[in-house]
Amino acid sequence: PINSWMQSAPREYGFYSNVNPEVAHPRWSQASERRIGEDGLLSRKRKTLMFNGYADQVAGLYAGMDLRKFF
């Protein structure tokens, strides 16, 4: 099914790209992030973790996939 994100901005980046911090968004890098709720809005950025920090739980779901794929 088409979700609201795909309706509003379908060319931003694919789902696989969203879980891979080594793939930059067309307009910004995903290599670092600022966590909401940690030391307020001025907290330091940290390196974005693969699979948004859930690699132990979900990496097997992506086995053999091209995680740079845009779709």
Image (spheres, helix red, strand yellow):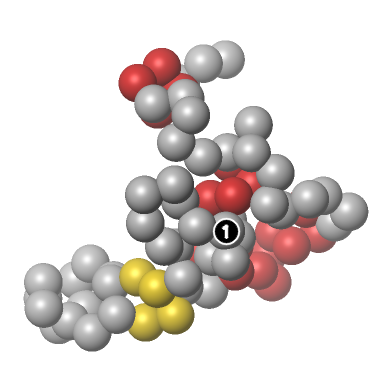
Across and down, in percent, residue 71 comes to 64, 31
Mark 1 residue element: loop
Give the vertical position of 48 relative to 46 (above or below). Answer: above
Q: Residue at x 11, y 78 (%)?
A: 42
- In the rendered image, residue 65, in percent from the top left (x then y), is placed at 82, 49
Of the pair 45 and 24, the residue shown nearer to us: 24
Could you tell me the amino acid type at mark 1?
Val
Q: Quadrant of the N terminus?
A: top right
Above or below, comparing residue 48 to residue 15 in the picture = below
Judge whether residue 68 can be spotted in this image. Answer: yes
Percent position (x, y) of residue 4?
Answer: 38, 21
Task: Evaluate whether residue 54 shows in this view.
Answer: no
Q: Is residue 67 left or right of residue 41?
A: right
Say whether residue 32 is left or right of residue 22: left
Q: Quadrant of residue 33?
A: bottom left
Residue occupying the point 40% across, 73% down:
32
The residue at which mark 1 appears reads as: 23
Going by the picture, which residue comes out furthest to the right? 64
| Total marks in image | 1
Instruction: Bin the neighbour count of mark 1 within 10 Å (Cα to Cα): few under 14, some 14-19, many 20 and up.
Output: some
Compared with residue 61, is residue 52 higher up or lower down, i.e. above or below? below
Seen at 41% across and 17% down, the residue is: 7
Q: Which x, y percent locates residue 25?
A: 45, 51
Outermost residue to the front: 26
The residue nearer to you, when weighing 27 against 3, is: 27
